[in-house]
């Protein structure tokens, strides 16, 4: 049931709207002027706000501006003094809709239902985003991970290119995502490209797109990831596995901020921040002629080395507790307790797969253990997997 606030200085209008909306099973509050309305909005979460234009103390346009600063609730402006200019101004400012008095009942109810759907979508998006961001939590307080967190805080607000290095499973993608989330580009796309998973003959089409007919299976034009990331961030994961021909085109894109689709001639300007990651030693790859030195220098304006788990063993209790809580919540079961003996056993293991491997082992124990995870459980479910 949607919760609606009516802001109008005319008691008769408020009473009429309340009667109509309560008949339609909406929950309704009233405010006699804009100042009272804003005070109510600070204390209560509304799904829709109906706001008059002409009111004493503060007119509806000013109220709308204040509401938009406070929250993202859909606002429907209503007025008996309506004109096109006022309606256009209200919509430009961010009002959901504008309805003139005398109110058309059907139009009003349709607008409210549409606004209700928008409000629901906004709330669902917020919940989903919180869940996604929660999955990106960077857990740990060890000196090694604090260095990484500090670098992210310093570098994220800039447009500097970043090269993230580290072993498999250390959380390089997590660092890339936080660089994007804490940047000025956070509301724009974050496009991830796994350079190791795309065949060398297709990587250029993936990155830069292609024109129809440029090769056998190109049955229609396709935008590449650089275009899709325009205004945001492109994350080139495992860039050490990229072909030399693709490296040359990436270098050109970084130099000129332009790309050309495969089979095309038109230069397309792009505004992207490039974050790259690799588990390879690119200096060695340069010596072996597998990686371009000029591209390396373009990418490595900032270097972030993500530490392996064996260099941050003091973070294992926090990581284990976080994963246990996450898995138990997803499985709808009470949180499991993990004993000190279990933590001690976890610290003895050489985690060659790093955080990813630890996460898998914790998930396995959450599934197979009943009320708590103890030292013997770690020995039983983790150590036998190692040679």
Image (tube, rainbow, N blue to C red):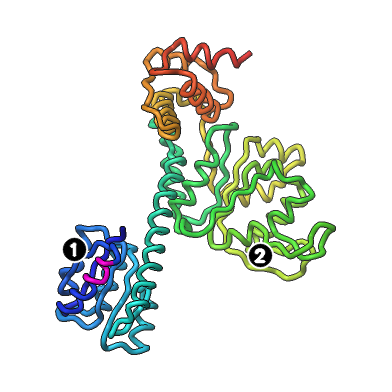
Q: Earlier in the sequence, mark 1 or mark 2?
A: 1
At horizontal 69% and vertical 41% (from top left) the residue drawn is: 196
Main SS category, magenta section: helix
- Marks 1 and 2, how far apart at CA: 50 Å
Are circles 1 and 2 on residues that touch, CB within 8 Å?
A: no
Residue most extreme to the top:
376
Residue 335 included in the magenta stretch of the image:
no
Q: Quadrant of the N terminus?
A: bottom left
Task: Name the residue located 50 percent from the left edge and 42 percent from the top edge.
Answer: 175
Which residues are the magenta region? 19-23
Between residues 113 and 263, which one lies in front from this camera angle? Answer: 113
Foreground residue among 51 and 306: 51
Relative height, residue 318 to residue 375 (above, below): below
User: Label 1, on which residue?
Assistant: 40
Q: Nearer the viewer, mark 1 or mark 2?
A: 1
Looking at the picture, tell me which residue is in the foreground, 284 or 217. 217
Q: Left or right: where does residue 283 sit relative to residue 272?
A: right
Q: Is residue 13 left or right of residue 182?
A: left
Say above or below: 215 vs 300.
below
Residue 224 place in picture, x, y as percent: 67, 59
Residue 317 left/right relative to 193 = left
Q: Determine which quarter of the picture holds residue 216.
A: bottom right
Q: Position of residue 245 (x, y in %)?
A: 77, 51
* SS class, disc 2: strand
Snapshot quadrant of residue 333:
top left
Q: Residue at x 79, y 60 (%)?
A: 218
- Badge 2 crowding class, 10 Å Cα cut-off, few under 14, some 14 to 19, many 20 or more, is some
Image point (76%, 45%), residue name: 199
Question: Residue 226's x, y, as percent?
Answer: 63, 58
Question: Mark 2 — residue?
Answer: 258
> Where is 265 relative to 343, above or below?
below
């Amino acid at each position: 049931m949607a919760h609606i606030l009516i802001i109008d200085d005319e008691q008769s209008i408020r009473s009429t709207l309340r009667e109509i909306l309560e008949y339609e099973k909406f929950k309704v509050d009233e405010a006699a002027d804009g100042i009272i309305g804003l005070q109510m909005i600070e204390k209560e979460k509304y799904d829709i706000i109906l706001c008059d234009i002409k009111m004493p103390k503060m007119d509806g346009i000013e109220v709308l501006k204040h509401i938009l600063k406070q929250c993202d609730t859909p606002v429907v402006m209503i007025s008996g003094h309506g004109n096109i200019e006022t309606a256009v101004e209200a919509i430009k400012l961010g009002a959901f809709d504008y309805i003139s008095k005398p109110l058309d009942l059907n139009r009003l109810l349709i607008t409210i239902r549409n606004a209700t759907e928008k409000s629901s979508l906004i709330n669902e998006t917020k919940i989903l985003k919180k869940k996604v961001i929660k999955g990106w939590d960077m857990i740990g307080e060890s000196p090694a991970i604090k260095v990484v967190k500090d670098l992210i805080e310093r570098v994220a607000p800039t447009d500097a290119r970043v090269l993230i290095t580290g072993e498999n499973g250390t959380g390089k993608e997590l660092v890339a995502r936080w660089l994007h989330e804490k940047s000025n580009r956070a509301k724009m796309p974050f496009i991830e490209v796994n350079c190791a998973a795309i065949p060398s003959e297709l990587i250029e089409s993936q990155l830069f797109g292609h024109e129809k007919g440029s090769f056998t299976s190109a049955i229609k034009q396709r935008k590449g990831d650089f275009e899709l990331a325009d205004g945001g961030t492109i994350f080139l994961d495992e860039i050490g596995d990229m072909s030399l021909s693709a490296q040359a085109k990436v270098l050109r894109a970084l130099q000129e901020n332009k790309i050309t689709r495969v089979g095309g001639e038109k230069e397309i300007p792009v505004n992207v921040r490039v974050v790259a990651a690799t588990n390879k030693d690119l200096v060695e790859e340069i010596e072996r002629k597998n990686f371009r030195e000029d591209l390396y220098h373009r990418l490595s304006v900032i270097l972030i080395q993500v530490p392996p788990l064996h260099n941050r063993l003091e973070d294992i209790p926090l990581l284990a507790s976080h994963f246990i809580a996450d898995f138990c919540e997803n499985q709808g079961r009470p949180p499991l307790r993990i004993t000190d003996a279990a933590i001690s056993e976890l610290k003895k293991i050489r985690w060659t797969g790093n955080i990813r491997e630890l996460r898998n082992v914790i998930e396995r124990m959450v599934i197979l253990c009943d009320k708590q995870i103890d030292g013997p459980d770690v020995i039983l479910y983790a150590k036998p997997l190692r040679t």
